[in-house]
Image (spheres, rainbow, N blue to C red):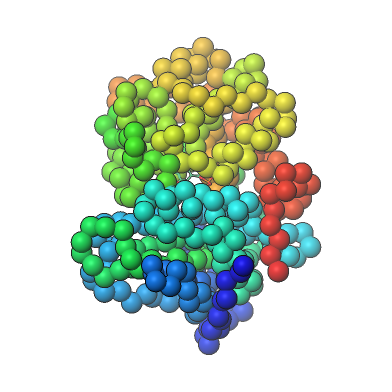
Amino acid sequence: MSMEISTTLSEQPVDDTRLAEILENPGFGTHFTDHMFLVEWTPEKGWHDARITPYGPLSMDPATAVLHYAQETFEGMKAYRQPDGSVATFRPEANAQRMVRSSARLAFPELPVEDFVQAVDALVEADERWVPEAAGEKSLYLRPFMIATEVFLGVRPSQHVTFLVIASPAGAYFKGGIKPVSLWLTEEYTRAGRGGMGAAKTGGNYASSLVAQQEASAHGCDQVVFLDGQEGKFIEELGGMNMYFVYGDGRIVTPETGTILEGITRSSVIEIAEGLGHKVEERKISIDEWRDGVASGEITEIFACGTAAVITPVGSLKWDGGEAPSPTADAGGELTMKIRQALVDIQYGRAEDAHGWMHRIG
Ligand SMILES: *Cc1c(COP(=O)(O)O)cnc(C)c1O
C-alpha cells in the first residue's frame, strides 16, 4: 500500500536566476529547496497526513519532547543527476531499513520502508530543478528525520511523532582536489558503549562527538577518530565516517559492526572491493595494529567513507605524545582512488549498475 500524499506547492519558489547562482556554488547544508515532506504518527491514527508543503519553519511548543530528551533519528542520502537528465538515488531502501533499526533503538514507531522511499521520491520530484548537474560531483543531499513531537515533559516514548524530509544542494566535498584528512586520536572521549546508541543514526551521537572534534581542531587535525568504549584499544570510526585499512598483500580490514554506524557506503565499498578480487576482513583492529602497520609499511593505504565525502584518504594520525605519518604522503592511495571512482561512476550513471543500487525517480 502506498501513502496518500497531498501537495501544496510554494507560491514563492526561488527564481531561476537565483537557483542557478546557488547551484553554481552550493556548499553544504546552507541552501534548502522550495518544499519539504512531513507525515505524522499517533497511536490512534498510525502514520497520517502525509504532505509536501512549502519549505519553512516548524512551529513548536517549548515543551516538545525532542527539544528535551533528544528522541530523534535521521538519515543522509543523495540524489544524483544522470547522463540522460533523469535523477536517481543510491540504495534508498538501505537508508529506509537503517532508519527502521535506528527507530527501534530510539523507541519510535516503524516507518515502513516503502513509505520512506515514497516520501523521498515525492520531495525529489517536487524539487527536481534543485538537483545540480553531475559535473564536479554535485548532488542534492537529502535529510530524512524523525522527531518526538508530543508536548510533554515526562520521560517516555513520544505519543506524537513527525517524520520529515528536507533537501539541500551539495557541492563537491573536496574543493580543489582530493586531499587526505589528518586525524586526531581521542583517548578521553568515546562515541558509544556496549548497549548504547552507537549503531543508531541519532543526533545524540553527534552532540557527544562535538567536544572531541574541538579537541582535534585544537591539535590541528581535520577529524577525530574514536576507540571502543570498553578497552580504549580498538578503532571504531570517525565522527561521521567508517574506516578502512589496506594491506600490502591486498587484504582490506574494516572494524566490525556493533557499536559503529553501519554505513551504506561502508557496505558498498565491501562489495566493490570484493568484486575487484580483494579479501575484506570485518574484525577488531587495534590502534597498535594501525601504528605498527604504518611504521612497518604493511599498511599501505587508509581511507574513510560516508555519503558526504564518498571516500576520503586518511593521512597522518596524531595523539597525545606522538604521530604516525600518512602511508601515502599527500595523495590518496591507488586502491582508495580506484574504489572511489567505481562508486562515483555508479552513482552518476557512468558505469553499469551491476548491483542494482540505483533507484530512478519519476
Ligand atoms: C551516517 C554515518 C556514517 C556513514 O554512513 P553512510 O551510510 O555511508 O553515509 C558513518 N558514521 C556515522 C557516525 C554516521 O552517522
**Residue reaching furthest to the front:** 44
Decide: is 121 above or below 105.
below
Q: Indicate the quadrant containing the N terminus: top left, top right, bottom left or bottom right.
A: bottom right
Residue 125: % across, % down: 64, 71
Residue 26: % across, % down: 54, 63
Q: Indicate the quadrant containing the C terminus: top left, top right, bottom left or bottom right.
A: bottom right
Residue 260 visible to an observer of this rendering? yes
Q: Image point 36% across, 29% down: which residue?
A: 228
**Residue reaching furthest to the bottom:** 11
Camera-nearest residue between 251 and 322 = 251
Residue 347: % across, % down: 68, 51
Camera-nearest residue between 98 and 248 = 98
Decide: is 19 above or below 309.
below
Left or right of 41: which side holds 23?
right
Q: Which of the 4 image quadrants contains residue 222?
A: top left
Decide: is 252 above or below 180.
above
Decide: is 102 above or below 14.
above
**Residue reaching furthest to the top:** 296
Residue 31: % across, % down: 49, 68
Q: Image point 32% across, 63% down: which residue?
A: 158
Q: Which of the 4 image quadrants contains residue 239?
A: top left
Q: Image point 68% across, 36% down: which residue?
A: 272
Q: Image point 53% across, 87% down: which residue?
A: 11
Q: Which of the 4 image quadrants contains residue 229?
A: top left
Residue 245 visible to an observer of this rendering? no
